[in-house]
Image: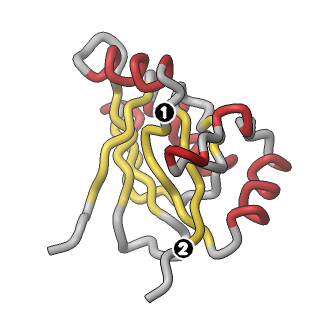
Amino acid sequence: MKIALVSVPVPDPVAAHEIYTTRLGFVSKTFEPENQLAIVAAPEDPQGTAILLEPCKGNFAEPYQQAAHDANMPIIVFSAADPAAELARLESRGVTLRPDLNRPEWGIDNVFEDGCGNFVMMEADATD
């Protein structure tokens, strides 16, 4: 069994699609703005696990997103072969890095804002 799709709460899937594709570098897998449907994937694995940019405004996911944000907890973790280089690339594209939220004692490092109300963590790719 493999993970096919995960959901990340965002206030506006159309705006989030723009941020995730232009700033974060994901590729569009499904985009139907009229239906508030936005799904993106990693350019390195466009047929792999995808992210549904889930509209949370006014539903049960909105307080969850706010609670995670208020607790300074990443809502999802991405990986890269070279996290420092990837974070530098993201910062050059206007992404806000949040080293003030790093908590090594919890195993949380390399936190950044996705621009949609979520904190994200970047870790090194796992090796076998």
Answer above or below: position of 57 versus 47: above
- Classify residue 87 as left or right of residue 53: right
**Percent of width and height locating residue 108:** 55, 47
Q: Residue at x 32, y 22 (%)?
A: 64
Answer above or below: position of 90 versus 79: above
- Considering the numbered disc 2 on the image, is that residue within a helix, a strand or a loop? loop
Quadrant of the snapshot with the C terminus: bottom left
Instruction: Compare residues 105 and 128 and report the one nearer the observer.
Output: 105
**Percent of width and height locating residue 76:** 44, 46
**Percent of width and height locating residue 74:** 49, 38
Amino acid type assigned to the residue bearing label 1 in the image: Met
Q: Say which mark, if any, is on residue 125.
A: 2
Amino acid type assigned to the residue bearing label 2 in the image: Asp
- Classify residue 16 as left or right of residue 83: left
Q: Residue at x 31, y 32 (%)?
A: 35
Q: Earlier in the sequence, mark 2 or mark 1?
A: 1
How many numbered discs sit on the rendered protein?
2
In the image, farthest residue toward the left: 1
Q: Say which mark, if any, is on residue 73.
A: 1
Q: Residue at x 34, y 39 (%)?
A: 37
